[in-house]
Image (cartoon, grey):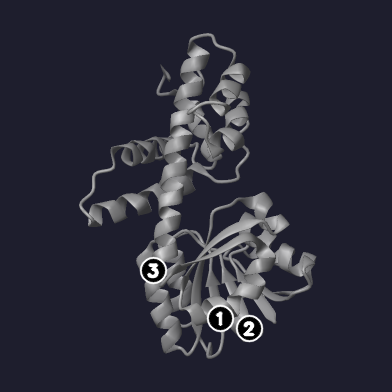
Amino acid sequence: MNIGVVGVGRMGANMARRLKDRNFHVTAVYDTNRKVATDLAGELGCAACQDLAEVTAQSDVTFTVVTDDKAMRNIFSGTGDNLLVNARGKLFINCATISPQVHVDVEKLAEKAGAQSLEACMASSITQAREGKLYLMCGGAEAAFRKAEPVLRELAATVRFIGKAGEAAKVKALVNMVMNINTAGLAEGLALGDALGLDLKTLREVFAQTGAASRVLETDGEDMQNRDHSCFFSAAHASKDSGIALELARQRGLDLPLAGATKQQYERMIAEGLGELDKSGIAELTFKGRHKHSGDRL
């Protein structure tokens, strides 16, 4: 099985490394950042393709890990060069967090080209990608899922088939929406504790043993306290993903005030130049005295 990877940032690159470790034949990588692609290709001993169609030609299965809806549409339907050129018989496994409708549209385009498409939404981060411990939620035709499953099992600790195209993307949007709300709530709790003069290590321990416990507390609590915001999941991505969930809510006539307020906080981070910090960096907006904007102490 020859495998290509389109989008080799932090997640895509580590997925490619994992597959190489598991003795899959990674034949081609592609990224709009040419240097990132050539560096990884040199490491893995594969081609750094200049054209998307070249990735398809060299691969039986292509993973895509791109940034947003626009990027996803471009790689599958861009004028001239795209992944569906001469794609008959190929399988595309799409891992980005994007709008559900885009996954539905890509599946239709792939079917028209004689190919298969599967969404494999990731609820994990960089370390899990490298170690093959992703949590994958899959949507699409069951035949495509069964074809992809052997390789997905090498990347993930858990692989769940959710349903038809778009369904896994809906679940992933809600996962990230709730995670983002939890992150913002934790930042406010720790900020208030700090302002009250409480010992934050003790406070985090109490949170962990009570109703304030959360997965975010485990992953981000200490980082918020120590101002260590090395990026595993950026504030910019958090804003995008909360926006996907809010649009789904708008379509169903639901008002989600907590999700809306959280998105506004992440948008504020972006506006103040903090968008590439990890999502834990939202604490910079809540701890007293940490971040200044226009001379105002927050």
Distance of mark 3 from mark 2, alpha carbons? 22 Å
Is 58 left or right of 242, judged from the image as shown? right
> Which quadrant is the N terminus positioned in?
bottom right
Instruction: Name the element at disc 3.
Output: helix
Residue depicted at x 47% and y 23%: 189
- Judging depth in this view, the residue of 206 and 25 nearest the camera is 206
Which residue matches tag 1? 91
First of labels 1, 2 by sequence position:
2
Q: Which mark is residue 243?
A: none
Which of the 4 image quarters holds residue 78?
bottom left
Marks 1/2 in contact by CB < 8 Å: the verdict is yes
Give the farthest residue toward the front: 210
Report the amino acid beneath label 2: Asp
Task: Name above or below for residue 163 compared with residue 268.
Answer: below
> Which quadrant is the C terminus positioned in?
top left
Q: Position of residue 9 (x, y in %)?
A: 62, 58
Distance of mark 1 from mark 3, alpha carbons? 17 Å
